[in-house]
Amino acid sequence: MTKNAKMEINLKTCIIILNYNNVEDTIKCIDSIERINTAAIKYIVVDNNTPQKQKIEILSEYLEQKFGVNYRLVHEGEEYDPILPCITLLLSSTNDGYAKGNNKGLLLAENDPEVHNILILNNDILFVEDIIPALEKYYYSIPDIGILSPMLCKNDLSLDLRCARKNTNIYIETIKKLLNYTLVVTKIDLNQNQYLIKKENEVKELMEIQLPSGSCMFINKKLFADIGFFDPNTFLYVEENILYKKLHRLGKKNFLCGKLKCIHLGGASTQHLKSKIFLLKCERDSFAYYWKEYEKHSWLLILIYRYALFQHRMLYTFINKYIKKTFS
């Protein structure tokens, strides 16, 4: 039986990939999966209204060439067959950020009766192992599971500590922003307190965590639908925090599987000053929403956090302008 025939008969897991202005990483991500994967899967690639339409043409041509008749292009709002082909490219009419963008793909998957599981995947993830069959097997062996994630590695295969974290604390976040970029703490990693793993030898086959990495999350489709998928009130950041709180209310727990790994390259579009300032604004708004709606913190405490982040942003802008002016 061919791989495509297997997909047509026994489709279970749907991979949701969000693309924005970076088709190169999206293509590399899909190629890495296709080289290794043996599971029955479908893909939904959601393009978040990439402004350079020639890039979408490149992506569409690649998908049509690779998947042939098993590829479908869908524009947001148009009617479609609920039984999805092997891969669907959904063109969003607006850039609504991470949560809403993924939700558009999730709604397609929700209506497909052949899809049983969801794998949320950043387009800067590379598969180095055939992890989907193992994720499926591990997931349904763990009682009261919410999200299961593999271990994330950097490009050199060293451990990415961000794949296993505690939930975010408003007091620690405020202090981090107040102290960041000062000479007192430049050599202190204030994120260390949040990491559940400090060294690779601490990684276990299965370990309970609070915050998985939003770049690679495996979850049962019905459970995801029961909690309303992603909260659409954030553009970027705190998606994992909100999922943790929603699942925790249902008595569900998140796990990391240390036996499975993939590479997380990390976004390249956040390196410039303009992008950094925009990201800080997203961070401010998303955390303020999370603190208020999910943690029920007082408005005064949230105001102090927002001030700390404002100071952080102003100092970042000043330092970067000074460096640019001095050394350019």
Image (cartoon, rainbow, N blue to C red):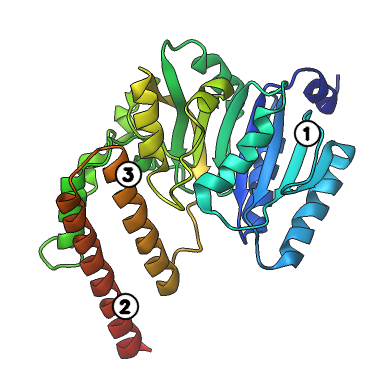
Decide which of 221, 65 is in the foreground and name it: 221
* x 80%, y 21%: residue: 6
Residue assigned mark 3: 290
Q: Which mark is residue 284?
A: none
Apparent side of residue 215 relative to residue 87 in the rendered image (left or right): left
Residue type at the position of mark 2 = Asn
Residue type at the position of mark 3 = Tyr
Residue that lies at the very extreme toward the left in this rendered image = 184
Residue 14 lies in quadrant:
top right
* x 65%, y 59%: residue: 49
Q: Position of residue 199 (x, y in %)?
A: 29, 36
* x 15%, y 67%: residue: 182
Rounded to the nearest angstrom, the CA distance separating label 2 from label 1 is 46 Å
Residue assigned mark 2: 320
From the viewer's perspective, is residue 275 above or below residue 208?
below
Looking at the rendered structure, the secondary structure element under dot 3 is helix
Q: Position of residue 200 (x, y in %)?
A: 33, 34
Q: Residues within 10 Å of mark 1 (few under 14, many from 20)?
A: many
Decide which of 305, 323 is in the foreground and name it: 305
* x 23%, y 39%: residue: 296
Apparent side of residue 174 relative to residue 123 in the rendered image (left or right): left
Quadrant, the C terminus: bottom left
Residue type at the position of mark 1 = Cys
Q: Earlier in the sequence, mark 2 or mark 1?
A: 1
Quadrant, the N terminus: top right
Residue 36 seen in this snapshot: no
Looking at the rendered structure, the secondary structure element under dot 1 is loop
Residue assigned mark 1: 86
Q: Earlier in the sequence, mark 3 or mark 1?
A: 1
Q: Position of residue 275 (x, y in %)?
A: 44, 68
Rounded to the nearest angstrom, the CA distance separating label 3 from label 1 is 36 Å
Discs 2/3, front: 3
